[in-house]
Amino acid sequence: MPYVNIKITKTGATAEQKAELIKGATELLQRVLNKNPATTVVVIDEVETDNWGVGGETVTARNAKASR
């Protein structure tokens, strides 16, 4: 049973976009590894940008710098 964990920042992904991610990951595992879609589990975790760091700073801080 494949288990896929997708982590994204909580920046407004829609239900439709999440459904597309789940479908795409499931289809990829079926196509590449011949895994059964019925037993493939996909979980999407949305992380607050204050809790996600890149290059020694939070995504919140990076986004604030980029919008200046």
Image (cartoon, helix red, strand yellow):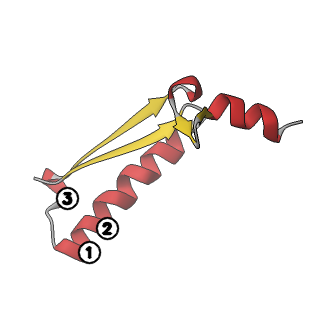
Residue 37 has which mark? 3
* Position in image of residue 27 (x %, y %): 31, 65
User: Which secondary structure, mark 1?
Assistant: helix
Check the image and report above or below for 57 versus 35: above
Mark 2 Cα-neighbour bin, 10 Å: few <14, some 14–19, many ≥20: some
User: Who comes first in sequence, dot 2 or dot 3?
Assistant: 2
Q: Which residue occupies the foreground of this view, 8 or 67? A: 67
State the residue at coordinates (36%, 55%): 23
Q: Amino acid at mark 3?
A: Pro
Horizontal side of 61 relative to 49 (left or right) equals: right
Residue furthest right as drawn: 68
Q: Nearer the viewer, mark 2 or mark 3?
A: 2
* Position in image of residue 1 (x %, y %): 10, 53
Q: Which residue is mark 2?
A: 28
User: Who comes first in sequence, dot 3 or dot 1?
Assistant: 1
Horizontal side of 30 relative to 12 (left or right) equals: left
Residue 64 has which mark? none
Q: CA distance from mark 2 to mark 1?
A: 5 Å
State the residue at coordinates (46%, 44%): 18
Q: Mark 2 near mark 3, Cβ–Cβ under 8 Å?
A: no
The quadrant in which residue 30 appears is bottom left
Q: Amino acid at mark 2?
A: Leu
User: Which secondary structure, mark 3?
Assistant: helix
Q: CA distance from mark 3 to mark 1?
A: 10 Å
Q: Which residue is mark 1?
A: 31
Q: Amino acid at mark 1?
A: Arg
Q: Mark 2 near mark 1, Cβ–Cβ under 8 Å?
A: yes
